[in-house]
Image (tube, rainbow, N blue to C red):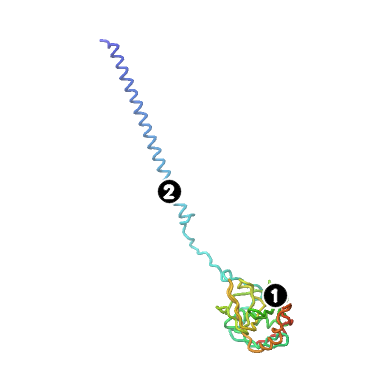
Amino acid sequence: MAASKNEQRQARERLRRFTARQRVHTHQQRRRRRDNFLAVAGVLVVIALAAATQVYFFTAGPGARAATTPSPSPSPSAQAGTNVGDIPAATLSQHRQWTGTLTLNDVPLGITLDGAAAPQAVAVFVQEVRSGYFPGKSCHRLTDAGSLLIQCGSLDGTGASDPGFRFGPIENAPADGSYPAGTIAMARAAGDAYSQGHQFFIMYGDGTIDNDAAGGYTVIGHVTSGLDKFITDIASAGVAGDGHDGAPAVATSITDVTIH
Protein backbone atom coordinates (compact mmCIF):
# COMPACT_ATOMS: atom_id res chain seq x y z
CA MET A 1 0.00 0.00 0.00
CA ALA A 2 1.52 3.28 -1.09
CA ALA A 3 2.44 5.81 1.61
CA SER A 4 0.20 8.78 1.87
CA LYS A 5 1.44 12.20 0.98
CA ASN A 6 1.50 13.11 4.66
CA GLU A 7 3.73 10.15 5.50
CA GLN A 8 6.07 11.02 2.64
CA ARG A 9 6.29 14.56 3.88
CA GLN A 10 7.10 13.38 7.43
CA ALA A 11 9.76 11.01 6.09
CA ARG A 12 11.39 13.81 4.14
CA GLU A 13 11.35 15.99 7.27
CA ARG A 14 12.95 13.23 9.36
CA LEU A 15 15.64 12.79 6.67
CA ARG A 16 16.28 16.54 6.61
CA ARG A 17 16.64 16.69 10.38
CA PHE A 18 18.93 13.65 10.38
CA THR A 19 21.08 15.13 7.64
CA ALA A 20 21.28 18.42 9.54
CA ARG A 21 22.30 16.64 12.73
CA GLN A 22 24.97 14.74 10.82
CA ARG A 23 26.34 17.96 9.38
CA VAL A 24 26.44 19.57 12.82
CA HIS A 25 28.14 16.50 14.28
CA THR A 26 30.67 16.42 11.45
CA HIS A 27 31.38 20.17 11.92
CA GLN A 28 31.82 19.75 15.66
CA GLN A 29 34.26 16.87 15.14
CA ARG A 30 36.28 18.91 12.68
CA ARG A 31 36.35 21.92 15.05
CA ARG A 32 37.43 19.73 17.97
CA ARG A 33 40.22 18.24 15.86
CA ARG A 34 41.29 21.78 14.81
CA ASP A 35 41.17 23.08 18.40
CA ASN A 36 43.16 20.10 19.62
CA PHE A 37 45.77 20.69 16.91
CA LEU A 38 46.07 24.37 17.76
CA ALA A 39 46.36 23.56 21.45
CA VAL A 40 49.11 21.03 20.82
CA ALA A 41 50.90 23.45 18.49
CA GLY A 42 50.66 26.19 21.10
CA VAL A 43 52.16 23.94 23.76
CA LEU A 44 54.99 22.99 21.42
CA VAL A 45 55.70 26.64 20.68
CA VAL A 46 55.81 27.47 24.38
CA ILE A 47 58.13 24.54 25.04
CA ALA A 48 60.39 25.60 22.16
CA LEU A 49 60.54 29.19 23.39
CA ALA A 50 61.31 28.05 26.93
CA ALA A 51 64.08 25.79 25.69
CA ALA A 52 65.55 28.55 23.54
CA THR A 53 65.46 30.94 26.50
CA GLN A 54 67.27 28.44 28.70
CA VAL A 55 69.92 27.86 26.06
CA TYR A 56 70.50 31.59 25.68
CA PHE A 57 70.58 32.17 29.42
CA PHE A 58 73.23 29.57 30.04
CA THR A 59 75.36 30.22 26.96
CA ALA A 60 75.27 33.88 26.03
CA GLY A 61 73.10 35.50 28.67
CA PRO A 62 73.63 36.46 32.33
CA GLY A 63 73.76 32.83 33.43
CA ALA A 64 76.68 31.96 31.18
CA ARG A 65 79.58 30.29 33.01
CA ALA A 66 82.87 32.08 33.27
CA ALA A 67 85.55 30.99 30.85
CA THR A 68 87.80 28.27 32.19
CA THR A 69 90.83 30.43 31.45
CA PRO A 70 90.86 33.32 33.93
CA SER A 71 91.13 36.82 32.53
CA PRO A 72 94.45 38.53 33.29
CA SER A 73 94.65 40.75 36.36
CA PRO A 74 95.70 44.37 35.84
CA SER A 75 99.44 44.81 36.17
CA PRO A 76 100.75 46.89 39.08
CA SER A 77 101.74 49.67 36.67
CA ALA A 78 98.25 49.74 35.19
CA GLN A 79 96.76 49.97 38.68
CA ALA A 80 99.11 52.50 40.19
CA GLY A 81 100.54 54.58 37.33
CA THR A 82 103.46 54.52 34.97
CA ASN A 83 107.06 55.70 35.21
CA VAL A 84 108.33 57.67 32.24
CA GLY A 85 111.97 58.10 31.25
CA ASP A 86 115.24 56.84 32.68
CA ILE A 87 113.94 56.01 36.15
CA PRO A 88 116.45 53.96 38.16
CA ALA A 89 115.48 50.87 40.12
CA ALA A 90 114.68 51.55 43.75
CA THR A 91 117.64 49.35 44.68
CA LEU A 92 119.97 52.21 43.71
CA SER A 93 119.00 53.78 47.03
CA GLN A 94 120.64 50.77 48.72
CA HIS A 95 117.85 51.15 51.28
CA ARG A 96 120.21 53.07 53.52
CA GLN A 97 120.88 56.55 54.82
CA TRP A 98 122.90 58.90 52.64
CA THR A 99 124.63 62.07 53.84
CA GLY A 100 125.96 65.01 51.89
CA THR A 101 125.79 68.72 51.15
CA LEU A 102 123.32 70.69 49.03
CA THR A 103 124.64 74.16 48.25
CA LEU A 104 122.19 76.93 47.29
CA ASN A 105 124.08 80.01 46.07
CA ASP A 106 126.89 80.09 48.63
CA VAL A 107 124.90 78.50 51.43
CA PRO A 108 125.88 74.87 52.18
CA LEU A 109 123.11 72.77 53.66
CA GLY A 110 124.01 69.49 55.34
CA ILE A 111 121.49 66.83 54.28
CA THR A 112 120.54 63.24 54.98
CA LEU A 113 118.50 61.06 52.64
CA ASP A 114 116.50 58.04 53.85
CA GLY A 115 116.77 55.26 51.27
CA ALA A 116 114.90 52.85 53.50
CA ALA A 117 111.80 55.04 53.89
CA ALA A 118 111.65 56.33 50.29
CA PRO A 119 113.76 53.98 48.16
CA GLN A 120 112.38 54.96 44.74
CA ALA A 121 112.62 58.71 45.23
CA VAL A 122 116.04 58.51 46.88
CA ALA A 123 117.25 56.33 43.99
CA VAL A 124 116.15 59.08 41.59
CA PHE A 125 117.91 61.77 43.64
CA VAL A 126 121.09 59.70 43.77
CA GLN A 127 120.98 59.23 40.00
CA GLU A 128 120.46 62.98 39.49
CA VAL A 129 123.48 63.75 41.65
CA ARG A 130 125.69 61.18 39.89
CA SER A 131 124.65 62.39 36.44
CA GLY A 132 125.44 66.03 37.35
CA TYR A 133 121.88 67.17 36.72
CA PHE A 134 121.44 69.59 39.63
CA PRO A 135 124.28 72.17 39.43
CA GLY A 136 123.05 75.33 37.74
CA LYS A 137 119.34 74.52 38.11
CA SER A 138 117.36 77.33 39.65
CA CYS A 139 115.12 77.47 42.68
CA HIS A 140 112.16 79.06 40.95
CA ARG A 141 109.70 79.26 43.85
CA LEU A 142 109.68 80.58 47.40
CA THR A 143 106.73 80.96 49.75
CA ASP A 144 106.85 83.18 52.82
CA ALA A 145 103.30 82.73 54.10
CA GLY A 146 101.55 79.56 55.17
CA SER A 147 103.92 76.71 54.32
CA LEU A 148 107.43 78.14 54.23
CA LEU A 149 109.33 76.40 51.45
CA ILE A 150 111.74 76.80 48.56
CA GLN A 151 111.33 74.64 45.45
CA CYS A 152 114.25 73.74 43.19
CA GLY A 153 115.34 71.50 40.32
CA SER A 154 113.09 72.56 37.45
CA LEU A 155 114.45 71.54 34.06
CA ASP A 156 113.79 74.91 32.43
CA GLY A 157 113.63 77.14 35.53
CA THR A 158 109.92 77.86 35.18
CA GLY A 159 108.59 75.06 37.39
CA ALA A 160 107.05 73.24 34.45
CA SER A 161 107.25 69.46 34.59
CA ASP A 162 109.56 67.44 32.36
CA PRO A 163 107.22 65.37 30.13
CA GLY A 164 109.98 62.82 29.53
CA PHE A 165 110.75 62.18 33.19
CA ARG A 166 108.18 61.29 35.84
CA PHE A 167 107.81 58.59 38.43
CA GLY A 168 105.92 57.27 41.46
CA PRO A 169 104.64 56.12 43.81
CA ILE A 170 104.36 58.48 46.74
CA GLU A 171 106.51 57.23 49.62
CA ASN A 172 107.00 58.18 53.25
CA ALA A 173 104.36 60.92 53.23
CA PRO A 174 103.19 62.12 56.67
CA ALA A 175 99.62 61.03 57.28
CA ASP A 176 98.74 64.27 59.08
CA GLY A 177 100.23 66.56 56.42
CA SER A 178 102.83 67.99 58.81
CA TYR A 179 106.22 68.88 57.31
CA PRO A 180 108.68 70.18 59.93
CA ALA A 181 111.38 72.71 59.17
CA GLY A 182 114.26 71.07 57.28
CA THR A 183 112.05 68.50 55.49
CA ILE A 184 113.19 67.67 51.96
CA ALA A 185 110.34 66.31 49.83
CA MET A 186 109.51 65.68 46.18
CA ALA A 187 107.33 68.16 44.33
CA ARG A 188 104.52 66.83 42.13
CA ALA A 189 101.36 67.85 40.32
CA ALA A 190 98.14 68.00 42.31
CA GLY A 191 96.29 64.70 42.46
CA ASP A 192 98.90 62.72 40.52
CA ALA A 193 101.10 60.27 42.45
CA TYR A 194 103.18 59.54 39.34
CA SER A 195 104.07 63.14 38.49
CA GLN A 196 107.22 63.35 40.63
CA GLY A 197 110.27 64.36 38.64
CA HIS A 198 113.41 66.46 39.07
CA GLN A 199 111.91 69.00 41.45
CA PHE A 200 112.05 68.96 45.23
CA PHE A 201 111.27 71.42 47.98
CA ILE A 202 112.81 72.25 51.34
CA MET A 203 110.73 73.44 54.27
CA TYR A 204 112.55 76.28 56.03
CA GLY A 205 109.81 76.53 58.66
CA ASP A 206 107.28 74.15 60.18
CA GLY A 207 104.23 73.79 57.97
CA THR A 208 101.20 71.77 57.02
CA ILE A 209 100.34 70.79 53.46
CA ASP A 210 96.94 69.18 53.06
CA ASN A 211 96.77 65.81 51.34
CA ASP A 212 95.00 65.74 48.00
CA ALA A 213 93.42 62.91 45.99
CA ALA A 214 96.85 61.30 45.51
CA GLY A 215 97.92 61.65 49.13
CA GLY A 216 100.83 63.59 50.57
CA TYR A 217 104.36 64.34 49.39
CA THR A 218 107.31 61.96 49.40
CA VAL A 219 109.74 62.92 52.15
CA ILE A 220 113.24 61.88 51.08
CA GLY A 221 115.32 63.41 53.85
CA HIS A 222 116.13 66.39 56.05
CA VAL A 223 118.44 69.38 56.28
CA THR A 224 120.76 68.81 59.22
CA SER A 225 122.69 72.09 59.16
CA GLY A 226 122.83 75.50 57.45
CA LEU A 227 119.11 76.29 57.53
CA ASP A 228 119.56 79.42 59.65
CA LYS A 229 122.03 80.90 57.16
CA PHE A 230 119.68 80.03 54.28
CA ILE A 231 116.91 81.96 56.04
CA THR A 232 119.20 84.92 56.70
CA ASP A 233 120.77 85.11 53.24
CA ILE A 234 117.85 84.04 51.00
CA ALA A 235 114.46 83.45 52.57
CA SER A 236 114.35 86.62 54.66
CA ALA A 237 114.40 88.72 51.48
CA GLY A 238 111.02 87.28 50.58
CA VAL A 239 109.37 86.86 47.22
CA ALA A 240 110.11 89.02 44.19
CA GLY A 241 107.49 91.69 43.60
CA ASP A 242 106.34 91.70 47.23
CA GLY A 243 104.21 88.62 46.70
CA HIS A 244 104.02 85.59 48.96
CA ASP A 245 104.46 82.76 46.42
CA GLY A 246 106.81 83.18 43.49
CA ALA A 247 110.42 83.61 42.48
CA PRO A 248 112.76 84.38 45.40
CA ALA A 249 113.71 88.04 45.67
CA VAL A 250 117.29 86.77 45.91
CA ALA A 251 117.80 84.78 42.72
CA THR A 252 118.74 81.28 43.87
CA SER A 253 120.24 78.27 42.13
CA ILE A 254 121.83 74.96 43.06
CA THR A 255 125.58 75.40 43.17
CA ASP A 256 126.52 71.83 44.01
CA VAL A 257 125.25 68.57 45.52
CA THR A 258 127.36 65.83 47.03
CA ILE A 259 126.22 62.63 48.71
CA HIS A 260 127.89 59.50 50.00
Q: Quadrant of the C terminus?
A: bottom right
Which mark lies nearer to you, 2 or 1? 1
Give above or below for 9 relative to 196: above
Query: What amino acid type should be assigned to the residue bearing mark 2?
Result: Ala
Q: Secondary structure at mark 1?
A: loop
Q: Residue at x 61, y 75 (%)?
A: 168
Give above or below for 258 relative to 57: below
Q: Residue at x 34, y 26 (%)?
A: 22
Q: Report x, y in % for residue 25.
A: 34, 28
Instruction: Please tell me in which quadrant of the rendered image residue 119 appears.
Output: bottom right
Query: Which residue in the structure is indicated by mark 1?
Result: 159
Question: Gap between marks 2 and 1, in whole Å?
Answer: 67 Å
| Along the line of sight, the residue nearer the viewer: 123 or 113 | 113
Q: Report x, y in % for residue 138.
A: 72, 80
Mark 1 or mark 2, which is nearer the start of the sequence?
Answer: 2
Q: Report x, y in % for residue 191.
A: 61, 71
Query: What amino acid type should be assigned to the residue bearing mark 1?
Result: Gly
